[in-house]
Image (cartoon, rainbow, N blue to C red):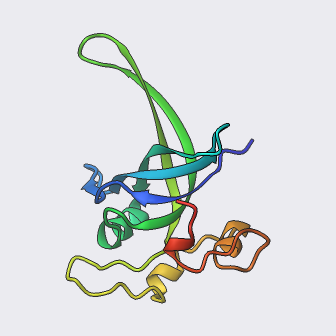
Amino acid sequence: MLNKVHLIGRLGKDPEFRTTPSGIAVATFSLATDEKRKNDNGETTSKTEWHKIVAFRRQAEVARDYLRKGALIYLEGKIHYDSYENKEGQKVYTTEITCDNFQMLDSRTDRGGDTVDRSSSQERSYKPTSAVESNIRGGGGGDDFASDEDLPF
């Protein structure tokens, strides 16, 4: 069985960070992915999907320290479905992505205003090891994107 998700998108807001009573770091944030298509009239249409992301432990700490609203990231994770009963007694279904790892794809600034060093050993330890990374960085058979402006969204 396989439950694997690969996403490239932009954060909808800064990550929310907390720790569980047992001391486990948890960060949640929303990630927007965009799909562009041409309709029957030849006009380009766009559809945005929003994904709820949950990161734990060291991933959560790195998300808190480096990710900001609008940041472009590559993310690998697993889909998790759940349901609960709300105050009105209605069943509510939720879908979230549990982040296994992520990589920052554009340079942003950290809380202090300094540019994040993309070559730091801390970030290197969170780089994905899949074929998708090769395509993102120009080493594979996929589209090669030179800058944010070249991305399809």
Give residue 42's position: percent from left, percent from top. 65, 45
Q: How many marks?
A: 0
Residue lying furthest top in this view? 89
Query: In which quadrant will I find the N terminus?
Result: top right
Q: Residue at x 30, y 56 (%)?
A: 13
Out of 43 and 130, give the one closest to the viewer: 43
Q: Residue at x 30, y 79 (%)?
A: 109
Give left or right: position of 120 versus 1.
Answer: left
Q: Residue at x 46, y 45 (%)?
A: 51
Give residue 98's position: percent from left, percent from top. 49, 49
Out of 49 and 25, give the one closest to the viewer: 49
Residue lying furthest left in this view? 112
In the rendered view, tell whether residue 147 sits above or below residue 70: below
Q: Residue at x 45, y 51 (%)?
A: 32
Give residue 54's position: percent from left, percent from top. 41, 50
Out of 81 and 14, give the one closest to the viewer: 14
Give left or right: position of 64 versus 31.
Answer: left
Give left or right: position of 73 versus 23.
Answer: right
Picture quadrant where residue 43 is located = top right
Picture quadrant where residue 57 is located = bottom left
Give residue 104's position: percent from left, percent from top. 47, 72
Residue lying furthest right in this view? 141
In the rendered view, tell whether residue 77 sits above or below residue 122: above
In the rendered view, tell whether residue 57 sits above or below residue 116: above
